[in-house]
Image: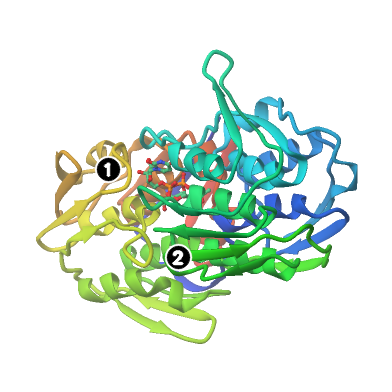
Amino acid sequence: MSKYIINGSKPLKGEVFAGGSKNSALGVLTAALMTKGVVVLRNVPDIEDVQLLLNIFESIGVKYAREDSTVALDTRGINETFVSTPDAVKMRASYYILGAFIGKYGKVSVPFPGGCAIGSRPIDQHIKGMTALGAKITEDLENGRISAECDGLHGKEIFFDCVSVGATINVMMAAVFAEGTTELVNAAKEPHIVDVANFLNYMGAKIKGAGTDVIRIEGVRSLKNRGDYTVIPDQIEVGTLMIAAAATKGDVTIKNVIPKHMETLSAKLEDMGAIVTLYDDAINVKGTDTLDAVSVKTAVYPGFPTDLQQPFSVLATIAEGTSVITETIYENRLKHLDELIKMGADVNVKGNKAYITGVEGLYGAEVSATDLRAGAALIIAGLVADGQTVVNNAQHIDRGYEKIHEKLRLVGADIEKISD
Ligand code: UD1
């Protein structure tokens, strides 16, 4: 157990670099297992979920070296397709091994995925897609495992019943080695899907349309080991820092950014009265004395990301008027609001909507992160609040934010991490 201790009420000012995308890195790292050789990946964030994934890889024969944000994977020693390390249940993206391995090895077995407890998170669309390609999927509920077997995969048109980032990436990886053409209809369009597709194409896959809702994949027999690839910046980390800047009435420039990925959040911040300036690969956010209430409804990309809903809700707690926040992706993603209430927030939750009426200010309290992005929200609340805030259960935050306390200190935050 670790915790963050924050002495708040200080505007953030200065420059900070965003790291590589967590969700992209998890996909790209796993896609690298689809080729044999040494693959060097850059801009990989130093976060717990990446380390867990590397531990899983090591348990099946992959060797890796990690220095700063560069990870070198040597996939030549892969000697196992049955993933049994307990680390696999601690994270969600371990299920990408299904998609990466089924076409290459014809069999694979992983424990049911873990990750944040923010909703029921079924994987029926992953199963639907891989089954359509010709895999036989077995779910062993007693032992908590999901296994896939096939005697070759065959391209197919697959209609996803709902838009799922994970299913899109997983089935796209499986389809790379399926004979013929696969078409994924109603695919997710998030930037990390484009990044994983770009990486696979760089190694010789034939994927077109990533970033739109129809992705077409021509199967190939093998991928070339092309060495070096740089993961895109983390849209959610950038967004979290932008929100922290606006919430503390600060003036922060975030570098290593793809501003296009931040358009929805930028528009909402401007609606509230903050000033957002976009540069080629940087964003500046200046807060204002008074923020106006806005309504936000989470949606798939390019809509407002569910991963930024919790951090964004902190702005609503100090904005003038009542904001309505509607969470449409995950049913349990408003739990952080109970913690914000302990810090003085005026919140009324009805179903998947939160009615948040701005108060004059938040005050420091001892609160607990219930999941990754909830933890980020509480850190922002601590930066805004008068007095001291203790955010317990910080391990949730470390899963997805790279040294967040060090980055925030660079822009003037008084935040300390205590690890047991
Ligand atoms: C990914 C991100 C996560 C983000 C989420 C939504 C990674 C590692 N994680 O999670 O940070 O919050 O996208 O942007 O990239 N669903 C089904 N059946 C399925 C799959 C999903 O019903 O087979 C539902 C889910 O319950 C959820 C919605 O679809 O309501 C979106 O889930 P999905 O996009 O799959 O999220 P993840 O890939 O798990």
Eye-nearest disc, 1 or 2: 2
Quarter placement of the C terminus: top right
Against 393, residue 236 (above or below) is below
Give the residue drawn at x 76%, y 50%: 33
Write the residue at 55% across / 33% down.
113
- Residue 144 relative to residue 340: left or right: right
x and y, in percent, of residue 116 in the image: 46, 37
Identify the image quadrant of residue 219: bottom right
Q: Nearer the viewer, residue 122 or 116?
A: 122
First in sequence, mark 1 or 2: give its number: 2
Crowding around mark 1 (Cα neighbors within 10 Å: few <14, some 14 to 19, many 20+) is many
Q: CA distance from mark 1 to mark 2?
A: 40 Å
Q: Position of residue 267 (x, y in %)?
A: 29, 75
Residue marked by disc 2: 214
Secondary structure, mark 1, is: helix
Q: Is residue 19 visible?
A: no
* Residue furthest out toward the top: 142
x%, y% of residue 336? 31, 40
Q: Residue at x 9, y 61 (%)?
A: 321
Residue 370 in the image, given as x and y percentages of width and height: 40, 35
Q: Is residue 330 above or below residue 319?
A: above
| Residue 340: numbered disc | 1
